[in-house]
Image (cartoon, rainbow, N blue to C red):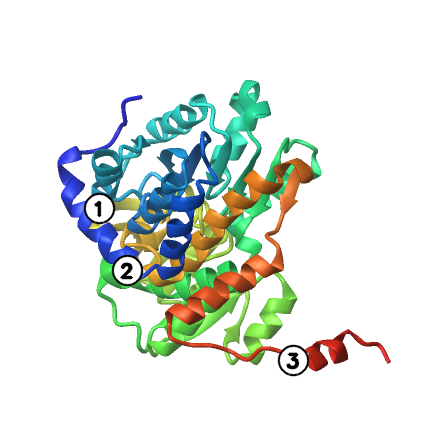
Amino acid sequence: MKPDIRDPNLAEAGATRMEWDARQMPVLQSIKDRFCHEKPFEDLRIGVCLHISTKTANLVTAIKAGGAEPIVCASNPLSTQDDVAASLVVHHEIPVFAKRGEDADTFRRHLHTVLEAKPDILLDDGADLVTTAHLSHRQHLERVIGGTEETTTGISRLRSMAREGALTFPVIAVNDSRTKHLFDNRFGTGQSALDGVIRATNLLIAGKTVVVCGYGWCGRGVASRVRGLGGHVVITEVDPVPALEAAMEGYRVMPMEEAAVVGDLFITVTGNRSVVNRDHLAAMKDGAVLANAGHFDVEIDLEALDELAVARRPARPFVEEYTLENNRRLHVLGEGRLVNLVAGEGHPAAVMDLSFANQALAAEFLVKRHEDLTPGIHVLPEEIDRDIAGMKLESMGLSCDKMTSDQKEYLDSWE
């Protein structure tokens, strides 16, 4: 099977960066060492649809060390790091089908290529691989023993499939593990989204009014990092409970209709479409910057913006300037795609150490337990979550207390 990557000559650069990140991922490296000896994936083909980054590369090599035959494609057309893709192909003989900036047809073709290889397990980010398998490769579904899903958005799609009885195999909701969403979503998205915005624009955040659309764990992370950089945070929400939380945590809360008028920078992290719509765009001030940190490029209504604009041009790398009729200029970062991966390097490796430890152990859990799992969404057992957290603490030179038997008995008692 011939890989489809940008340039194999980039492999050395990719290998150097992968090695750097591997040192920041001690939990995954420990799991990889065990996989080398135990070979839990012997004779299994694993389809991987994740962001092709240095962190993902370390996960994929860990899976291969466990005896698997990985085959890899990208979960976003603009998130692929071409040097990493080259290193996986050249140095690890792993077939990769991903190019940064690939068009929609190529992106879909790469998904189909992975599925045509008849994988036994699917590792997914955004559920494109799983949904495509059910829509276009039903003849191969009996072979699939299960899948894993990395993101909130992907799990939402899969829950919809499960409700309709369309999901034919078990999927581990990696995002639902505490060692994933409490750290990756909050600290990873918080830091990397701001990193992407700053790399693209060189804006000073201090003193700016930053509208964070959505106050889930990702929104919490973005809001806290904006506050830490001296920005004035406005939260928009559709759920009154997190809106109330945001208010009690000291943020301004208002409808998007009001926030559109005051914001200097808008960051969407909702997973929903048209969070920033035509009316909001028409009300924004001159120079406003729009970025998306949600999985799909639907949160900002770019079609409406294109219709409102009388001119557009690239203002900087990853920055498109739209001029409206009244000479106001709005700036969209990274084509409205994941700003942290389009304009930056994605989450820091140290936090992805936790997320990809979950992915690796979820795949192993499926191998061991798939016959006991019904089709639908499942969560990793709590003891695996605790083990991952414990390994991470140990790698940081930290430890925590343990309950005594007397304390356990007290908590278990009703008297």
Amino acid type assigned to the residue bearing label 1 in the image: Arg
Outermost residue to the top: 139
Nearer the observer, 17 or 317? 17
Tag in front: 1 or 2: 2
Residue occupying the point 36% across, 34% down: 73
Q: Is residue 259 visible?
A: no
Circle nearer the N terminus (3, 1): 1
- The quarter in which the N terminus is drawn is top left
Q: Position of residue 239 (x, y in %)?
A: 63, 62
Q: Where residue 404 is drawn, which disc sits there?
A: 3
For label 2, count other residues whose C-alpha is less than 10 Å away and answer few (under 14), some (14-19) or many (20+): few
Residue occupying the point 35% across, 60% down: 26
Residue occupying the point 46% across, 60% down: 185
Residue under pointer 2: 23
Circle nearer the N terminus (3, 2): 2
Residue under pointer 1: 313
Amino acid type assigned to the residue bearing label 3 in the image: Thr
Q: Where residue 12 is drawn, which disc sits there?
A: none
Q: Position of residue 84 (x, y in %)?
A: 24, 43
Q: Secondary structure at mark 2?
A: loop
Estimate the spatial distance between the alpha carbons at disc 3 and disc 1, rounded to whole Å: 65 Å
